Image: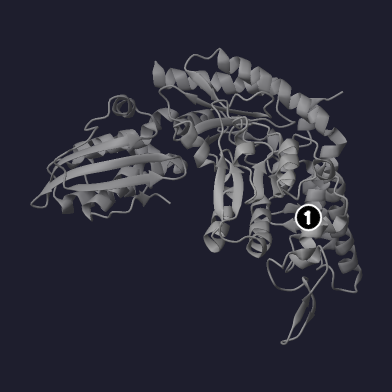
Amino acid sequence: MSDLRDLYQEVIFDHNRHPRNFGALPEANRHADGFNPLCGDRLTLHLRVEGGVIQEARFEGAGCAISTASASLMTEALKGKTEAEAAILFEGFHHMVMGEPVSVDLGKLAVLAGVSEFPARVKCATLAWHTLNAALKNESNPVSTE
Amino acid sequence: MFDVQRMRAQFPILAREVHGRPLVYLDNAATTQKPRAVIDAERHYYEFQNANIHRGVHALSQEATDAFEAARDKVKNFLKAPHREEIIFTRGATEAINLVAHSWGRTNLKAGDEILVSEMEHHANIVPWQLLCEATGAVLKVIPIDERGALVPGAFESLLGPRTKLVGITQVSNALGTVNPVADIIRKAHQAGALVLVDGAQAVAHLSVDVKALDCDFYVFSGHKLYGPTGIGVLYGKREHLEKMPPYQGGGDMIAQVTFKKTTYNELPYKFEAGTPHIAGVVGLGAAIDFILSVGLETIAAHEDTLLAQATRLASAFEGLQVIGTAPGKASILSFVMKGVHPHDIGTILDSEGVAIRTGHHCAMPVMDHYHLPATARASFALYNTPDEVDALFRALRRVEELFLK
């Protein structure tokens, strides 16, 4: 097993203790709920999308350090991105946590690369992103990692 | 005199390392490890006796049939069931409950009838009844639990009524460790004219079971939580009920005669055992029962109680750690949460120290809802665990604290 510190980097602890963009977003026009039935993690994602650009992203919910930090980092990364750019980021992020080659610059999201060494935790890292996908499609049913 | 090291030597897997550290296996409520005797029994079956049962006239088929039916007698004696034909082999406790819900339930329930289950049930003792209710219009009612994780006193009695047809109750809660007063529940249910199914999945490895003394109508358990193989379980049912119940599945072995006009069914227990069963699993289960009885359930329970008491003591001295499930007389399970750390993170960090525990909802989401928790961490003890391993658990929890809270 790789070092635990590869998984639990300081940035992740920081985002877990102090999640960014945490809370409701009354002016949001897209929402989705995500649920990981294996561990009980739940999150709700709120987006304000205008002209195809994500102006604001906030989230609520309770989860483990990996899922909370992932959601926090994702909301930071999304701000100002077009829906198409967000989809490219998701694809790159997914490749990274699966341990596959990544062709896009993931910026700060790269701190979650250690997840690929912990297969049982991949779903924690991707829950927020699956929820994003649902929010952009405005799906009303909660998405599940299963 | 119980010698835990001598016990450990019988479980080959306990010698392995995980992430470069000795394995500390504390996920026994999910599944127990297998002693050499069980592994050897399955191996012996495949290497010397493998054949299909109840059919062939050749020597191997007869030997396989004998081994299979001998295991049924072992289960009968283990549960103290009056008759061997009351022992039905299933894939596990889950399938056994589904069998009863489907076969007994769809024949005997109608709209407005009531089924009682407790709030601490495993999903396996909830969902089959929900499916039955959907199909028949019967109503599922829930006996609530209190803050300790015990049944609310008096709640069962007030829910029990003339419309109650069946009570489904776990003997030991897998999420909390609570031991339920099933004998009392069965007596009262019978006075009200209801049948009782006892989910013994978590109980059989810890408590001595006597279905005749309990007078339960159905009792179910899984082999793999009893140091036996996965994929095999048992339904005990009173003969008077099983005889009246229609088959659950159709196929070979469960028939007496088949024509396209009419098929007649085999006698008990074969009526409920369609198709070639998990013969090796049944043989392995028989070996597991021999093993358990050779150690003695009282000895096992006393050993586990010592470990649980040690763990509970260490937990109460651990600031920020809260035990979930504090009913008196618990069996072998320490469920807990840690302030500021999600159970899933606890599980990963403990794993890196070689300590295997379960984290999540333990297939008991209503229990989690009761405590307003998404999940708990759960350490569960078996006959081969040691006081040193309990110490290792708490050393690993200090490491969690160090990483997360310092």
Report x, y in % for residue B161. 63, 45
Image quarter of the C terminus of chain B: top left
Nearer to the camera, B342 or B261: B261
Task: Examine the rendered structure and indicate whether residue B369 appears above or below residue A33.
Answer: above
Q: Chain of mark 1?
A: B
Q: Residue at 20% across / 36% down in the picture?
A: A76
Report x, y in % for residue B123. 56, 47
Q: Residue at 35% across / 37% down in the picture?
A: A67
**Where, by quadrant of the figure, is residue B273 drawn?**
bottom right
Instruction: Name the amino acid type tagged 1.
Output: Val
**Relative to B113, is B404 on the left or the right?**
left
Image quarter of the N terminus of chain B: top right
> Can residue B355 be seen in the rendering of this structure?
no
**Relative to B203, is B334 on the left or the right?**
left
Q: Residue at 38% across / 35% down in the picture?
A: A63
Nearer to the camera, B125 or B378: B125
Report x, y in % for residue B295. 84, 33
Task: Examine the rendered structure and indicate whether residue B231 appears above or below residue B177.
Answer: below
**Where, by quadrant of the figure, is residue B268 drawn?**
bottom right
Q: Residue at 68% across / 60% down in the picture?
A: B104
**Where is mark 1, residue-wise?**
B282
Nearer to the camera, B292 or B235: B235
**Where, by quadrant of the figure, is residue B144 drawn?**
top right
**Relative to A99, is B292 on the left or the right?**
right
| Residue at the farthest left position | A51
Task: Examine the rendered structure and indicate whether residue B313 appears above or below residue B78.
Answer: above
Q: Secondary structure at mark 1?
A: helix
Report x, y in % for residue B326. 60, 24
> Can residue B68 be seen in the rendering of this structure?
yes
Task: Examine the rendered structure and indicate whether residue B305 appears above or below residue B372.
Answer: above
**Relative to A114, is B154 on the left or the right?**
right
